[in-house]
Image (spheres, rainbow, N blue to C red):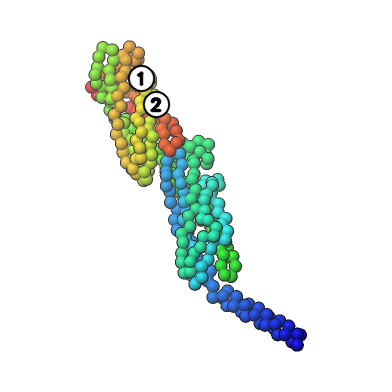
Amino acid sequence: MKRIILTACALTVLSGCAILKDLLNLASKSFQQPGFRFIDVSLTDISLGGLNLDTVWELDNPNNVAISLATIDYALFVENKQVVAGAPPSGLQIGAQGASKLHFPAGIKFADLVAVVETFLTKDNASWRAEGGLGVQTPVGVIRLPIAKEGLFEVPKIPAVVFGNPRVTNVTFAGATIEFPIKVTNKNTYALPIGGLTGNLAIAGSNVGSLSTGSFGDMSGKGEKDVSLPLTVSFTSAAGAVVNAIRGGNSQVTFNAQLQSGGQTLPLKVDQLVNFIR
């Protein structure tokens, strides 16, 4: 009798295993592979020192059961140099017949990419490349979905700085005050923080003092800002060419300045012929 019972139990277990196997085969045949696609790349916190680059993807679950992220392997390269990037947490669930956007943000400092930042900022575009894959936990096991995308992003440009015609005021025997109008233009299509310009000014090759604009704040895309900066020039210390320029006429002005943006300080030189107006 005992042998009969054991035999019956064994048959039951084997039958159960067969049923389970049939169910798994059925689930495997009915289960649809999740969809995974690149959506967009977004740029935020842009400055002349760096930016945040976020690649955005969508994971789609067409099945009637939930799936979750089991493993994430993501690498981001900018100008062929790997940068540190974040990723969604493992275990993130995508519900039945649902979809979820996945973000992979990276903070990029241009000084980490190139030795000379101002040379990098002369480029129109920079390259980026994403590599890796997702391991998605499903009822039929872990499915790997590849990450592969590359593209370009617009490199921020140093603003254009142009002098207007200086106006000579408050002339005395000792010297004169000169108002230097300056126009600063954001050449980018997006907003850019400009901390200000500070540097030495020369007229006809002779240094006459320093100018400082103060902070311009966040300049809108293609935006312009005008400032007028006074500078008092002493006749006793000024060269003859400077004195002649102040009396009226054309002369070369050279502004060797430092530009600040996003924690980065960059050299900027303006060399321009202007007409001094009295």
**Lateral position of residue 126 relative to residue 27, left or right:** left
Element carrying mark 2: strand
Seen from the viewer's position, the closer of residues 239 and 146 is 146
Q: Position of residue 142 (x, y in %)?
A: 59, 65
Amino acid carrying label 1: it is Val
Who's the residue at 58% across and 59% down the image? 71
Placement of 228 over or under 94, stated as above or below: above
Who's the residue at 35% across and 31% down the image? 214
Residue 163, picture quadrant: top left
Query: Mark 2 = which residue?
Result: 199
Amino acid carrying label 2: it is Gly
Element carrying mark 1: strand
Q: Is residue 80 visible?
A: no
Who's the residue at 28% across and 25% down the image? 179
Query: Mark 1 = which residue?
Result: 208
Q: Position of residue 190 (x, y in %)?
A: 37, 45
Q: How many marks?
A: 2
Placement of 20 over or under 138, stated as above or below: below
**Lateral position of residue 187 relative to residue 141, left or right:** left
Mark 1 nearby-residue class (10 Å; few <14, some 14–19, many ≥20): some
Q: Position of residue 138 (x, y in %)?
A: 56, 67
Real-space CA distance between mark 2 and mark 1, rounded to the nearest whole angstrom: 11 Å
